[in-house]
Amino acid sequence: MAFSAKGRTQTALAEINITPLVDVVLVLLLIFMLTAPVLQSGVIVAIPKTRSVNQLTEERMVVTIDKDQNVFLQDKPVNVNDLPNLLRTVGSAPTAKRVIYLRADERVPFGAFASVMDAVKQAGITDISIVTQPITK
């Protein structure tokens, strides 16, 4: 749209300023990048560090033991005696083909760790992966 004023032609400003949009998107990206590791699991556990760690991106059933020896199934507290029955009922895949991730705090005594592994095996699940962190140099 052109206007004529004293021989000059002026055009209307019809462009959208995207600078504020880019600023907001970058701030949101930063927020999501900072909060993504926190959303990994609701139970805080100091996972042991090892040299060989496989990065897996698949979503699996997770059993967690915190430093106070409380047992969680998918971030919900459970009794270790009820764990075999809960694992049999949760999920649609046959128990022989399911994989359980076992996260345990590094300060958990071996006896508590072994009793949770025994409960998982009582459910008929034999494929148990122990979650660890890589050693950073």
Image (cartoon, rainbow, N blue to C red):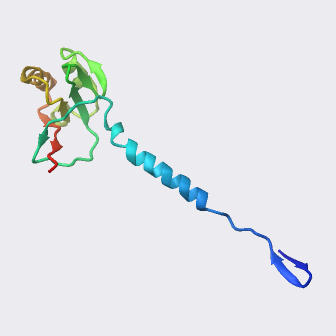
Question: Residue 86 versus residue 131: which sits nearer the camera?
Answer: 131
Decide: is 41 above or below 55.
above
Decide: is 57 above or below 88.
below
Decide: is 86 above or below 134.
above
Q: Quadrant of the N terminus?
A: bottom right
- 7 displayed left or right of 51: right
- 19 displayed left or right of 28: right
x and y, in percent, of residue 89 in the image: 27, 23
Q: Residue at x 14, y 46 (%)?
A: 135
Question: Residue 81 versus residue 44: which sits nearer the camera?
Answer: 44
| Residue extending furthest toward the bottom | 7
Image quadrant of residue 42? Answer: top left
- 11 displayed left or right of 7: left
| Residue extending furthest toward the right | 6
Image quadrant of residue 102? Answer: top left
x and y, in percent, of residue 46 in the image: 20, 33
x and y, in percent, of residue 105 in the image: 18, 29
Q: How many marks?
A: 0
Question: Residue 102 versus residue 31: which sits nearer the camera?
Answer: 31
Q: Residue at x 26, y 18 (%)?
A: 78
Q: Residue at x 22, y 28 (%)?
A: 64
Image quadrant of residue 34? Answer: top left
Q: Residue at x 19, y 17 (%)?
A: 80
x and y, in percent, of residue 52 in the image: 10, 48
